């Protein structure tokens, strides 16, 4: 799968970056391509370009707050993932998403 | 840059005798206050608890990352605590917590470098090996040894 996504937590100090790291590690272990933008206290990093979004199979949003730039994902398959679900089982979550995408074809 | 800079060396404790989440937070907050990293204990704790109310800070496997973004923080830093026994904590896997990284950030801080270091510490906790190591620490020196490992794992050249 080609995955793009955004993480953003309330304080923007820790969870934002930890959840991204977990998603990236899990995706790489499973052989997926992944790019995750973080919207945290440092500002927006690893910003998703229109190209990134266009080429993606799925958009993952793991955020406790409203993210900015959501309009970029119009028309794409978006999966909202509570941060705690990612922290608990990042690979499980990605496998489930892959299953669902396959089933929808 | 070494991530040990963002840890408050006067707020690192192993063997904390707290028997509840609140007591553990109070213990670490007290260390931060004694170091003058924060100006007011109850205001800081209030802000920590606000964040607690917004979502689980227990990230699984006995580790928690509570944080206080507070006007009373004078020095952005991380306090570290290992508890004598695990305490109940709202965590993603329902397990009790024995290791705490308490982040203290000034509400209006614009010190990007501080925030970057904190983000790196947070990211390092996605690594199972780092999590395993941090739960084994028995002394302050052990804690700093793990911090050095985290620094290396994050690809930061160590400067001694």
Image (spheres, coloured by chain):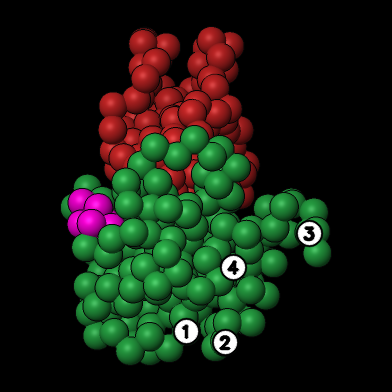
Comparing A21 with B55, the one in front is B55
Q: Quick one: quadrant of the C terminus of chain B?
A: bottom right
Question: What secondary structure do most residues of the magenta stretch adopt?
Answer: helix
Q: Which of marks 1 and 3 precedes in the sequence?
A: 1
Residue B139, disc: 2
- The green-coloured chain is labelled B
Among the two numbered marks 2 and 1 on one chain, the one whose residue lies closer to the N terminus: 1
Q: Distance between the residues labelled 3 and 2?
A: 21 Å
Please give the name of the residue rendered at 59% of the width and 68% of the height, measured from the top-left corner.
B130
Chain letter, red: A
Q: Give the residue at mark 1.
A: B14
Percent coordinates x, y for residue B98 in the rendering: 38, 78
Q: Mark 2 lies on which chain?
A: B
Q: What is the distance, in whole Å, between disc 1 and disc 4 at their CAs?
A: 17 Å
Residues shaded magenta: B43-50
Crowding at dot 3, Cα within 10 Å, few <14 / some 14-19 / many 20+, comes out as few
Q: Where is residue A91 in the image (x, y as percent from the top left)?
A: 47, 50
Q: Mark 3 points at which residue?
A: B158
């Amino acid at each position: 799968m080609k995955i793009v996504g955004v993480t953003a937590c309330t304080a923007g100090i820790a969870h934002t970056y930890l959840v991204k790291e977990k998603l990236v590690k899990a995706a790489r272990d499973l052989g997926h391509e992944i790019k995750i933008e973080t919207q945290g206290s440092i500002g927006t990093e690893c910003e998703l370009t229109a190209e990134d979004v266009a080429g993606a199979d799925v958009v993952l949003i793991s955020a406790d707050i409203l993210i900015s730039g959501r309009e970029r994902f119009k028309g794409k398959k978006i999966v909202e993932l509570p941060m705690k679900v990612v922290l608990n089982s990042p690979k499980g979550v990605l496998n489930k998403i892959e299953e669902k995408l396959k089933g929808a074809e | 840059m070494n991530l040990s800079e963002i840890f408050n060396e006067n707020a690192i404790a192993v063997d904390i005798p707290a028997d509840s989440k609140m007591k553990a937070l109070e213990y670490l907050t007290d260390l931060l206050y004694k170091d003058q990293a924060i100006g007011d204990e109850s205001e800081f704790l209030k802000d920590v608890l606000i964040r607690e109310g917004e979502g689980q800070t227990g990230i699984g496997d006995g580790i928690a990352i509570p944080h206080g973004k507070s006007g009373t923080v004078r020095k952005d830093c991380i306090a570290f605590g290992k508890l004598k026994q695990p305490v109940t904590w709202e965590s993603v896997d329902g397990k009790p917590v024995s290791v705490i990284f308490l982040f203290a950030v000034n509400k209006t801080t614009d010190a990007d470098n501080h925030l970057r270091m904190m983000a790196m510490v947070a990211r390092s906790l996605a690594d199972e090996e780092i999590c395993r190591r941090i739960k084994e620490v028995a002394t302050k020196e052990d804690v700093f040894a793990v911090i050095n490992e985290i620094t290396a794992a994050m690809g930061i050249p160590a400067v001694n």
